[in-house]
Image (spheres, rainbow, N blue to C red):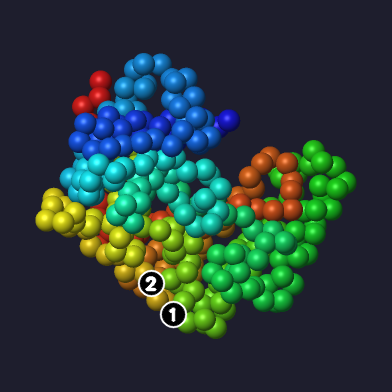
Amino acid sequence: MATQTINGKAFEYALLLELLERLKTITNVSVTENKPYKTAKEFFDGFEDKEQDTFRITASASINFLIDIEPRLSNGINENDTLVLELVSDQAGQTGDVRDVLMIRSSQKWEIGISAKNNHRAVKHSRLSQSIDFGKKWLGFPCSKEYYQEINPIFEMLADLKAKNKSTKWTSIENMHEVIYIPILNAFKKELLRLDKENSNIVAKNLVQYLIGNKDFYKVIKGNKTVEIQAYNLHGSLNQPFKKVKPKARIPKLKLPSRLIEIVYQENSTTTLLVSLNEGWQISFRIHNASSRVEPSLKFDINLVSAPHTLFTNHIFLNIK
């Protein structure tokens, strides 16, 4: 399994562990020991003590901060109000929920979640192929016949190359960028603009919700001796008071975009489109082949280039030797 995944899962476990350690003396806490929990624990336990400490120190700093801004973490209504901690399976991300760690109080009909990132910031890795209707899947509106007419010959050519020889490498395709990447990106760009024009005020918002997630969450990014906490408060469910206990910092609600402004190629690039939306959102879509062998699908590495100035961000510097 990729190192990135192993580190990510170990960090999720460290966050859950620090939540438990910090809160068990203040309130009733229980941990759901499901399959994702067992997998993450296994990865965490596989690290040396020093690395485990780094995960825990980073997690601890972010948890201390979250406890300050989320009073419901440490405050229950009564003894039966248990805070349930749970790790989520990766499948949830496909339905638009990007949270990895959940904190739930069913008595208060309240839950918040953390998206844990270990040294990377990508928001999604989505695919394009003949059989994928990205319009319907991402935005709720199907792609046009014209879009498929443009992409089908390219993906058919790739399917033929694979059928002839399963070991065919992408590097064997001459002018791959001109023959494959650019025509696919141009078709994608044209279709995204068409969908936005036909469904004004909806597509821009749905695109961000598909990429960022349809549930409010905190993103915790573990860096080298730093941890960054971002609050994606799209629906206003974060940062709620508990009775008279108020959060120690205020987190504004994030404004979703209502229109697509432009789609351009990143400077000097034949693989990356920059999608600009109103309210300060900009997203990059970098297309690439996921494996070295030819297959009739391509992958997007999607990153948030800029977010509204109302995106709450906190950097904590850590003293890790």
Q: Position of residue 297 (x, y in %)?
A: 69, 53
Above or below, comparing residue 155 to residue 189 in the picture? above
Question: Which residue carries the number 2 mark?
Answer: 257
Q: Nearer the viewer, residue 233 or 117?
A: 233
Q: Amino acid at mark 2?
A: Pro
Residue placed at 59% from the left, 69% from the top?
135
Q: Which residue is the extreme one toward the top?
A: 49
Residue placed at 67% from the left, 61% from the top?
132
Q: Nearer the viewer, residue 113 or 46?
A: 113
User: Circle 2: is it few (<14), some (14-19), or many (20+) Cα within 10 Å?
Assistant: many
Question: Which residue carries the number 1 mark?
Answer: 201
Residue placed at 31% from the left, 28% from the top?
56
Q: Nearer the viewer, residue 231 or 172?
A: 231
- Give the structural element (helix, strand or loop) at label 2: loop
Q: Amino acid at mark 1?
A: Asn
First in residue order: circle 1 vs circle 2: 1
Q: Which residue is the extreme one toward the right?
A: 164
